[in-house]
Image (cartoon, helix red, strand yellow):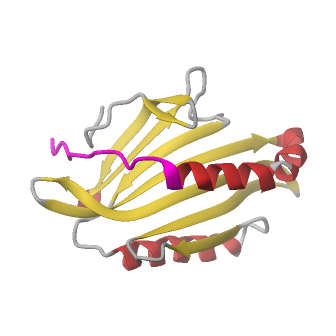
């Protein structure tokens, strides 16, 4: 059920993403995940997400929160790396990161994400920090090729998210 006024599909880099999952968490946190046709939440190759944070939080607080999450993850995920770049006007940040999961020393998956983080209007004359993100994920034996192709994919994904129009949102508070 759409909770932010973006039922989809959303087109990003010529791919159509359809709403697959939506939650309204505590403290006015909303999360919606979109997948291309044929993809499943438990085993997807690419996804798009929109996260809306409590209107009381600043851009810096949300970025710091995400950095803290990734620093904590680094303690158990040896592939976890991230970079945060602030726009020249200070109005938004781009965060790109790589995370993975392993079991018994074997890589299960690797996921590369690019998040565009900015404060924006969410309707009813309110503003909130929004993350508009895209990710690519690989599993098992395909991980080596995925990592090798990441340099080109990273540039394209970052440029795509920067060029993308931020979604127009209005919270559905039911």
Q: In this view, does 148 lie to the left or right of 101?
A: right
Q: Residue at x 67, y 44 (%)?
A: 136
Q: Nearer the viewer, residue 16 or 97?
A: 16
Q: Residue 172 lies in magenta, yes or no?
A: yes
- Pick the quarter of the image with the N terminus: top left
**Left or right position of 96 against 35:** right
Q: Which residue corresponds to the image point at 26% horizontal and 40% vertical from the top-left?
A: 3
In the picture, residue 99 is in which quadrant?
Answer: bottom right
Q: Position of residue 112 (x, y in %)?
A: 68, 53
Reply above or below: 95 against 42. below
Please tell me whether the stretch drawn in magenta is mainly helix, strand or loop: loop
Question: Is residue 49 placed above or below 98 in the rendered structure?
Answer: above
Residue 146, above or below 78: above
Residue lying farthest to the top in this orientation = 38
Q: Could you tell me if residue 146 is visible in this image? A: yes
Q: Residue 43: which quarter of the image?
A: top right
Q: Where are the magenta residues, as a range?
A: 162-174
Is residue 164 shown in magenta? yes
Numbered disc total: 0
What residue sits 26% from the left and 65% below the top? Answer: 54
Where does residue 89 sit, x and y in percent of width and height? 41, 76
Give the image location of residue 61, x and y in percent: 38, 78
Quadrant housing residue 67: bottom right
Q: Position of residue 133 (x, y in %)?
A: 51, 51
Residue at 71% x, 54% y: name it: 154
- Left or right of 74 in this view: 107: right
Can residue 111 be spotted in the picture?
Answer: no
Q: Quadrant of the C terminus?
A: top left
């Amino acid at each position: 059920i759409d909770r932010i006024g973006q039922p989809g599909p959303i087109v990003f880099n010529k791919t159509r993403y359809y709403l697959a999952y939506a939650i309204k968490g505590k403290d006015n946190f909303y999360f919606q995940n979109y997948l291309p046709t044929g993809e499943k939440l438990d085993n997807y190759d690419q996804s798009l997400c929109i996260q809306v944070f409590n209107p009381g939080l600043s851009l810096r607080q949300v970025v710091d929160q995400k950095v803290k999450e990734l620093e904590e993850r680094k303690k158990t995920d040896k592939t976890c790396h991230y970079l945060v770049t602030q726009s020249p006007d200070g109005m938004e940040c781009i965060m790109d990161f790589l995370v993975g999961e392993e079991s018994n020393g074997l890589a299960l998956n690797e996921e590369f994400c690019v998040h565009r983080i900015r404060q924006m209007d969410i309707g009813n004359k309110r503003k909130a920090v929004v993350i508009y993100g895209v990710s690519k994920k690989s599993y098992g034996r395909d991980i080596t090729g995925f990592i090798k192709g990441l340099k080109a994919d990273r540039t394209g994904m970052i440029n795509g998210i920067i060029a993308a129009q931020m979604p127009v949102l209005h919270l559905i508070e039911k």
